[in-house]
Amino acid sequence: MQLFIQTQLRLEDTSVIFNKEEGRHIVKVLRKKEGDILHVTNGLGLIFNCELTHVLDKECTAKVLNIKKEKARDYYLHLAVAPTKNNDRFEWFLEKATEIGIDEITPILCERSERKKIRLDRYSKIIEGALKQSLQSYLPKLNPLTSLDDLFSFSTNYDAIFIAHCESDALKVNLKDKLQPNKHYLILIGPEGDFSPSEIKRARLYKYQEVSLGHTRLRTETAAIIACHSVAFINE
C-alpha cells in the first residue's frame, strides 16, 4: 500500500484533485495510469480508496470509490520541544516522532534557545512525508513557535504535564514510571543548554511534574524521541 495526503478532502467529496507536487510524483515517479487504485488520507482519520480517472504530467484526478474511517489512538501526546541550532536534528525529530506516533508538536522558545526562527511550511512537509511513509491517517498538529510562558498559560486539559530537565534529581522521577495507558500528556523538552533554573521554577508554579529521561545527558532531539517512544510503548 502507498499512501497519499490531501488535507482538503472531506467525507462528502466524490473526487480528488491532486496538487502539482503529488500529481508529478504519481505520473513521473510511480508511473500510474488511468484505472489504477490509490489510497489517500486527509490527515483526519479518513482513508479514501480512489480510481485514477485523469492523468497528465502535472495534473491528476481520481474518483472516490469508498471511504474508511481509521480508529484514533487511545492516548494523546503533545510534545513541546525547543528547536535545535542544527535544524537537521529538529527535522529528524519531526520525522521520527510522526512515525512513532504523536498528536501535537509545539516548537518552544526558551531563555537558552539557539534557534529563534523556524520554517513551519518546511516542517509541515516533513511531517506529511513521514505520515505517508508510516501509513498513518491522523496528521499531527504543528503549532507556531511559542514562548515557554505562553505555553504555560494554556497547559490545560491534560491528565498530566511534565518538564524533562537535567538539573538536580531531588524532585524528579523517571518519565516511564509516571506514564499510564490511554491518557493525555504534555511533555516539555528544553534547548541544548537545558531549561534555565527560573524556567523550571515557573513550571513548578504551573504544576508541571519534573522528570528524568535516564542517567545520561541527551541531545534535545534524542530526549524528545525517548519521551515520544515511552508514551507509545506504554500504550502498546
Image: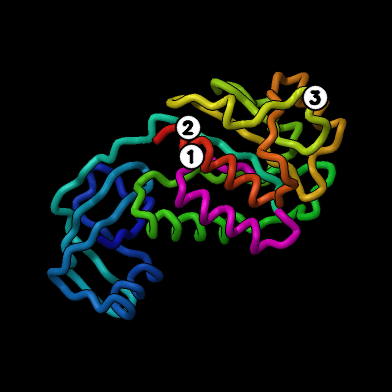
Please tell me which residue lies in front, 205 or 178: 178
The residue that mark 1 highlights is: 103
Coloring applied to the structure: rainbow
Residue type for callout 2: Tyr
Helix, strand or loop: magenta stretch: helix
Local packing at callout 1 (Cα closer than 10 Å; few below 14, some 14-19, many 20+) is some
Between disc 3 and disc 1, whose residue precedes?
1
**x then y, percent, for residue 152:** 71, 28
The quadrant in which residue 70 appears is: top left
Residue type for callout 1: Asp
Local packing at callout 3 (Cα closer than 10 Å; few below 14, some 14-19, many 20+) is few
The residue that mark 2 highlights is: 76
Q: Tell me the residue at 45%/57% (across/down).
A: 130
Q: Which residue is farthest front?
A: 215
Residue range highlighted in magenta = 84-106
Label placed on residue 218 = none
Tell whether 63 sits left or right of 200: left
Please tell me which residue lies in front, 23 or 109: 109
Local packing at callout 2 (Cα closer than 10 Å; few below 14, some 14-19, many 20+) is many
The quadrant in which residue 148 appears is: top right
Q: Tell me the residue at 35%/75% (across/down).
A: 24
Q: Are discs 3 and 1 less than 8 Å apart at CB?
A: no
Q: Are discs 2 and 3 less than 8 Å apart at CB?
A: no
The residue that mark 3 highlights is: 170
Q: CA distance from mark 3 to mark 1?
A: 31 Å
Q: CA distance from mark 1 to mark 2?
A: 6 Å
Residue type for callout 3: Ala
* Discs 2/3, front: 3
Q: Are discs 1 and 2 less than 8 Å apart at CB?
A: yes
Can you say whether 144 is above or below 58 in the image?
above
**x then y, percent, for residue 186:** 59, 31
Between disc 2 and disc 3, whose residue precedes?
2
